[in-house]
Amino acid sequence: MSKVTVSVTDWIDASFEADVAGGLAAFNAAQFGPSGHRELAVSLYRDDEFVGGLAGFTAWEWLFVKWLWIREDARGAGLAAQALDAAEAEAKKRGCRAAWLDTLNPAARNVYLRHGYIVFGELPDFLKGHARYFMQKRL
C-alpha cells in the first residue's frame, strides 16, 4: 500500500468540497436511494424592505431548517412563524413528513417549541454555559 499524505487547512477549496460532497452523495444514494435534495428559501419583506428569511433544504422526506433570521426591529411580530409555516407548507408539497433543525438560542428554541417542534437531543455546554438543541416536528 502506498503512503497516504494528510493535509489540514483552514479553508475549503471548491473542488475539495465538490469531491467530498459528491463522493458522500454517491455513497448515500447507493445505500438509501436518491435523496431528492432541493434547496428551499423563504424571504420576508415589509413593503420593499427585507426583514428576514429562512434557508434550508428538503431531502429524504425531511425539511432541514438551516437558518432562520428575523431583523431585530421586526422581531415579535410573528414573522418567524410565518417563515416556518411557508417552509413547512412547501416541504409538504415536496412530500416531506417531518422537519428538523438545531439552535443555540434559547429564545429561538422557545419560538420553535411554540410552533410544535420538540427537543430530541441536547449538547449541554456546547458553548460554555450554553446548550445546543436539536429539534423536530412531524408535518
Image (cartoon, grey):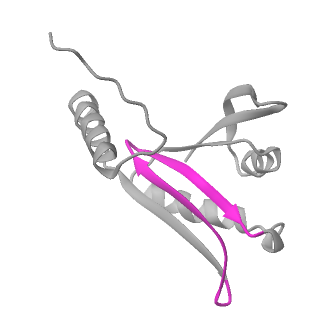
Vertical relation: 36 (above or below) 72 = above
Q: Which residue is drawn at 56% across and 51% down?
A: 65
Which residue appears farthest toward the left when viewing the image? 1
Specify the quadrant of the image occupied by residue 128.
top right
**Residue 53 is covered by the magenta coloring:** yes
Q: Position of residue 77 (x, y in %)?
A: 81, 71
Q: Position of residue 13 (x, y in %)?
A: 36, 48
Which residue appears farthest toward the bottom when viewing the image? 47
Vertical relation: 88 (above or below) 100 = below
**Residue 82 is covered by the magenta coloring:** no
Specify the quadrant of the image occupied by residue 87.
bottom right
Q: Out of 11 and 98, give the one closest to the viewer.
A: 11
Which residue appears farthest toward the top when viewing the image? 1
Q: Position of residue 8 (x, y in %)?
A: 42, 31
Specify the quadrant of the image occupied by residue 74.
bottom right
Q: Out of 61 and 57, give the one closest to the viewer.
A: 57
Vertical relation: 16 (above or below) 78 = above
**What is the number of callouts on the image?**
0
Say whether residue 51 is left or right of residue 21.
right
Q: What stretch is highlighted in magenta?
A: 46-71
Say whether residue 34 is left or right of residue 50.
left
| Quadrant (top left, top right, bottom left, bottom right) of the N terminus | top left
Q: Residue at x 70, y 35 (%)?
A: 133
Main secondary-structure element of the magenta-colored stretch: strand
